[in-house]
Amino acid sequence: MSIDAVEISLFAHRLAAICEEMGAVLKRSAISPNIRDREDFSCALFDEKGELISQAAHIPVHLGSMAFAMSGVIPLFEWKPGDVVVFNDPFLGGTHLPDITVVAPVFIDGELVAFSAARAHHADIGGVSPGSMGVEIRLEDEGVIISPCYWFEAGIEDMKLPHLFYESVRAPAERMGDLSAQRAAALRGGERLNDYKAEKLREMFAALISVSEGYGRAALSSIPDGNYAFEDFLEDDGFGSGPLVIRADVQVRGESAIVDFTGTVLQSKGPVNCPLAVTAASVFYVFRCLMPEHTPQTAAVFHPISIRAPQGCLVNAGRGAPVAAGNVETSQRIVDVLLGALAKAIPDRVPAAAQGTMNNVIFGGTTNGEAWVYYETLAGGMGAFNGGEGLSAVQCHMTNTKNSSIEVLEMHYPLRISTYAVRDGSGGKGAFDGGDGLVREWSVLKDCNLSLLTERRSSQPYGLAGGKVGKRGVNSLWRNGEWRALAAKGSFELKRGDRIKIETPGGGGFGSA
């Protein structure tokens, strides 16, 4: 049966709408502000082999890593109707431990035809530090490791997972509520796919994969053949090691490309290491940005791209390495490196560096005997480009979350927002200025713990074509009547009356002023 362009376009948009609806179910059903309000989650659909066939416009680092890793998870099970599988193991399909993935198979007339998945960042998954994103040296110290396992098997709940949560994580009822919301989202995706017959769905999947691969090859063919190398660095790993160099050589030949990370520093003691899935997500994101907006969101657009990363280096860390910041900070720097390389090939299409960090802030403590954890990433400046200024105070590149509203934050946690403003003048100057960062300041009402995972505190986001660098970020603590500097990464004990101020970096400028 032939499938015309109109039919395949309508089908692609239909699948995207299903993924958006899954996200709406998750948002409306979740309990934690991190998922319900910040929308730190992603939803996607896969074919029966684990090939990504659609995704919503959620979190790039979630979606790219799922596209890379799901095919390795699916063969581990004999799938049945009613199954629900859960995992967060960074080296078996995950990213970092707070990101938990819920997967449900989709059966139509008794045939396995697809998978529906929802990945969400939980505010805590156990471990040494509240929020599970402290500066640790072992993966097991970062939290509970969940290798792919049944939560429901043939519709019957296996209570081992709920028991694990209630024994190991902070605020377990909130965690289980969020996990149940993810299950509801995954099941909704399966319900919507049941509008199709199994044979028709497989036929449409195959056609969509073929079409989207063509978009990927066309995007690569628009880049001049050549080798384009660039390097940048992470400032430190939280234990004094740094700078940590990330180097990439982008080799473009016709309709294919190889991204070679040879020359990147070895994996680190601290939690800035990347599983290969996160590195792949960062690479895929950069090339996806070169494709037309209407490109179908399947993994096939990335088939012409190969990744080489030496085993044991920072961007292909070995099992057991701490990875909490690899997902959120190192992924951002990989994007900076690839954009820097591609700027040599297509300078008019590549922006200057964005803020280059997610500015992870995690508060945690106990109130009236109940544990609480608040997690947030902070927006900053986006890099300028040839033809326009960078946006100010926005989430950039590998993250796409909203902020925590002041009202929700103050209602749930013993914190108050003292300042929330654009950091005027922090973007790099140029013919087109980089976007400005922001300033966010919290007043602490009760003793608690603070963890920070931030970057661009000593280095600065680069400009391009003569544009100036953006301003570096600043972390500060107010105590005993004076401001003092806080390290870019670390855990700190806070006292009632303290204030924490984060000034996020600006983006780089483009072109000479």
Image: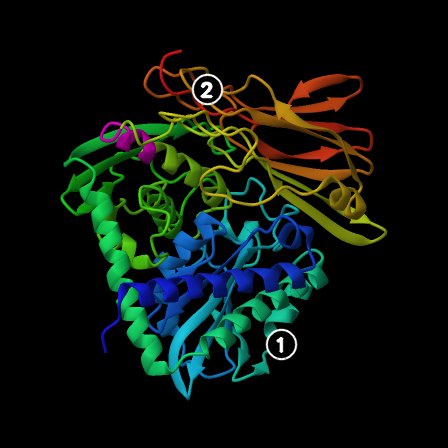
Q: Which mark is residue 159?
A: 1
Can I make out residue 123 in this image?
A: no
Give how far across and how far down residue 511 sits, in percent: 36, 17
Give how far across and how far down residue 302 sits, in percent: 28, 53
Image: magenta residue range: 338-346
The residue lying at 18 percent from left, 43 percent from top is 221
Tag 1: amino acid: Met
The residue lying at 40 percent from left, 22 percent from top is 462
Can I make out residue 105 in this image?
A: yes
Q: Which is nearer the eye, 428 or 326?
A: 428
Residue 154 lies in the magenta stretch = no
Give how far across and how far down residue 467 sits, in percent: 38, 16
The C terminus appears in which quarter of the rendering? top left
How far apart marks 2 and 1 lie (CA) works out to 55 Å
The residue lying at 56 percent from left, 67 percent from top is 185
Give how far across and how far down residue 351 sits, in percent: 37, 29
Against 219, residue 350 (above or below) is above
* Secondary structure at numbered mark 1: loop
Q: Which mark is residue 433?
A: 2
Against 397, residue 211 (above or below) is below
Q: Which mark is residue 236?
A: none
Q: Which residue is farthest top?
A: 513
Tag 2: amino acid: Asp
Label 1: how many Cα within 10 Å (few below 14, some 14–19, many 20+): few
Q: Earlier in the sequence, mark 2 or mark 1?
A: 1
Between tags 2 and 1, which lies in front?
A: 2
Residue 414: quarter of image = top right
The residue lying at 80 percent from left, 54 percent from top is 370
Q: Which residue is farthest bottom?
A: 110
Q: Which is nearer the eye, 440 or 215?
A: 215
Against 273, residue 198 (above or below) is below
Q: Please state if 442 lies on the left or on the right of 475 as rendered.
A: right
